Image (cartoon, rainbow, N blue to C red):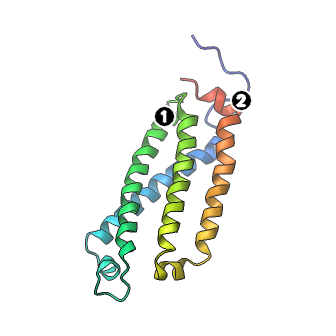
Amino acid sequence: MQEPPLGVSGLGGWLVLVQIGLFISLITRVVTMFQAMSIMGGSETGNLLTSPSSPYYHPLWKTSFIIEGVSSAAMLLFTIIILVSFYQKKRVLPRLMIIFYVVNFLLLLITVLILNQIPLAKEVQGVNSISTLIGGILGCAIWIPYFIRSERVKNTFRN
C-alpha cells in the first residue's frame, strides 16, 4: 500500500498547461500528418514543389514532406501513449515528457535545417525559423526542469 503523497498532488497547477499542450500537439500532429500525405499523394501544391519540371522544384521538398509525415505519425502515437500514462498517473510519465520535449525540439531543428537548404522555403520562412527554434529551446528549458524538480509531479505520478 502506497503512502498518501505529501504536499501538492493531482493534475492541477502547471500540469493543466501540460495537458492543454498535449491536446494541441495531438491536433497539430494529425493536421500535419494529413497535409504531408496530401502533398505526397499528388496534390497540386505537392506536384508544384516535387516535380522536376516545376520552377519551384527542389529535391529536398519531397524529403521534408516524408520526414514531416512520418515524424508526425510517430509523435501522434507517442502523444497518445503519454496522454494515457498521464491520466493513469504512471511513474514513467516524467521521463516520457522529457523525451517528448527533447524529440520535439530535435524534429523542429531537423525541419528548420532542411527547409533552410531550400531557397523558396528559406525566403518564405525568413526570421520565423529562428524564433521557432528559440521557442523550442525555451519550452525545453521550462518544462524539462519542471518534470525533474516539481513536487506536484513527484506526488502525482506514482503508479
- Where disc 1 sits, the SS reads helix
As drawn, 47 above or below 25:
below
Viewer-proximal residue among 75 and 1? 75
Give coordinates of residue 134: x percent, y percent: 65, 62
Residue visible at 53% across and 23% down?
Answer: 159
Give coordinates of residue 135: x percent, y percent: 64, 61
Q: Is residue 13 visible?
A: no
Residue visible at 61% across and 36% down?
Answer: 11
Residue visible at 43% across and 50% down?
Answer: 75
Instruction: Give the tally of numbered discs.
Output: 2
Three-letter residue code for mark 2: Val
Residue extending furthest toward the left: 42
Q: Can you say which quadrant of the picture contains the N terminus?
A: top right
User: 10 Å neighbourhood of mark 2: few (<14), some, or many (≥20)?
Assistant: some
As drawn, 21 above or below 11:
below
Give coordinates of residue 158: x percent, y percent: 58, 24
- Where disc 2 sits, the SS reads loop
User: 10 Å neighbourhood of mark 1: few (<14), some, or many (≥20)?
Assistant: some
Q: Determine whether, in the image, residue 23 is placed left or right of residue 58.
A: right
Residue visible at 58% across and 70% down?
Answer: 129
Query: How far is disc 2 from disc 1 in space, using C-alphas?
Result: 19 Å
Residue extending furthest toward the right: 7
Three-letter residue code for mark 1: Ser
As drawn, 26 above or below 150:
below
Quadrant in the rendering for residue 56: bottom left
Q: Identify the residue position indicated by label 1 in the image.
A: 85
Viewer-proximal residue among 8 and 104? 104
Quadrant in the rendering for residue 154: top right
Disc 2 versus disc 1: nearer the observer: 1
Q: Identify the residue position indicated by label 2 in the image.
A: 8
